[in-house]
Amino acid sequence: MPSDCAKPNPSNNEPIRLNRYLAQCGLGSRRACDRLIEGGLVSIDGKPVTSLGVRVFPFRDHVTVDGRPVRLESTRVLMVHKPRNILCTAHDPEGRRTILEMLPEAWQGLRLYPVGRLDRNSEGLILVTNDGELANHLMHPRYHVEKEYIVWLRLPLTEEQGRAMLRGVMDRGERLAALRIEPVPTKGRYTCYSMVLGEGRNRHIRRMCETVEASVARIKRIRLGGLSLGELPVGSCRELTPRELSFLRKDVGL
């Protein structure tokens, strides 16, 4: 069953900014919530609000968005060990299996969504949450949340290839770079490396390797910030502990 890992709630006597309250209700980042307010979709005690500076008493005021009541939710943050051939999206129009469909029955029906993406053929650590503010901070390049991957290549990297990826390569108008690249001992037929990124663009490692003509056989994410995949089995998930969640929020300035 989901544990009750609630985020710290303001007391009844402490008003908070409306955009922060909406973000804590699971409606997205503060910037996204600002757009809801500016669009006239938010009301407090039946009165429409369009000013971004308005504060709300979380446990006293009645807040609605587009006519529907909203309330603070307990923070749910799950670590999932994603297998290959699973899509990191809430819904796929082609009917392919998604990360949310992997969750245990106790988690089905909750308003959860993946934090960022691992492409369909990649595997490893991904978070699923209802905390829009936390998700936005984790994905924003401003906060430089490190992501570590184990990458299996069909041939060893040359010095020139390694230097190019550390300097950064251009692909489709985007600069793709690794912070660190280190060889990892392996007994398999492929050469194995640890690659650490400071940001994660779409298919970042695959595109970076393609640009320097390095052939990728397999990619597995093993760390996000201070969170490690550890021994979590493939296809399994677990909820973050309060301690892990506290450190994670601190890492991104929350």
Image (spheres, grey):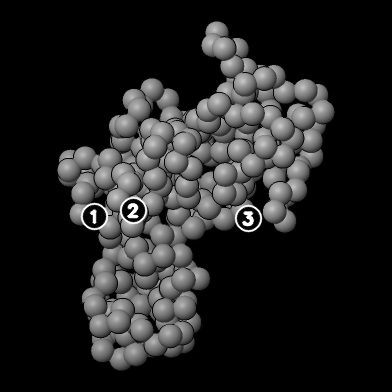
Q: Which one is nearer the viewer's eye here, 10 or 170?
A: 170
How far across and how far down the image is residue 222, in percent?
A: 49, 30
Where disc 1 sits, the SS reads loop
Q: How packed is label 2: few (under 14 Cα within 10 Å), some, or many (20 or more)?
A: few
- Left or right placement of residue 136 versus residue 23 in this view: right
Residue that badge 3 annotates: 142
Contact check, label 2 and label 1, Cβ < 8 Å = no
Q: Which one is nearer the viewer's eye here, 97 or 245?
A: 97
- Quick one: which residue is furthest to the top in this view? 187
The residue lying at 72 percent from left, 56 percent from top is 173
Residue that badge 2 annotates: 94
Three-letter residue code for mark 1: Leu
Do we see residue 76 in this rendering?
no
Where disc 3 sits, the SS reads helix
Residue that badge 1 annotates: 110
Where disc 2 sits, the SS reads loop
- Quick one: which residue is furthest to the front in this view? 94
How far across and how far down the image is residue 129, in percent?
A: 36, 51
Vertical placement of 177 versus 252: above or below? above
Vertical placement of 68 versus 93: above or below? below
Query: Residue 23 sits in which quadrant?
Result: bottom left
The residue lying at 79 percent from left, 35 percent from top is 164
Do we see residue 35 in this rendering?
yes
The CA distance from mark 2 to mark 3 is: 34 Å
Q: Earlier in the sequence, mark 1 or mark 3?
A: 1
Three-letter residue code for mark 2: Glu
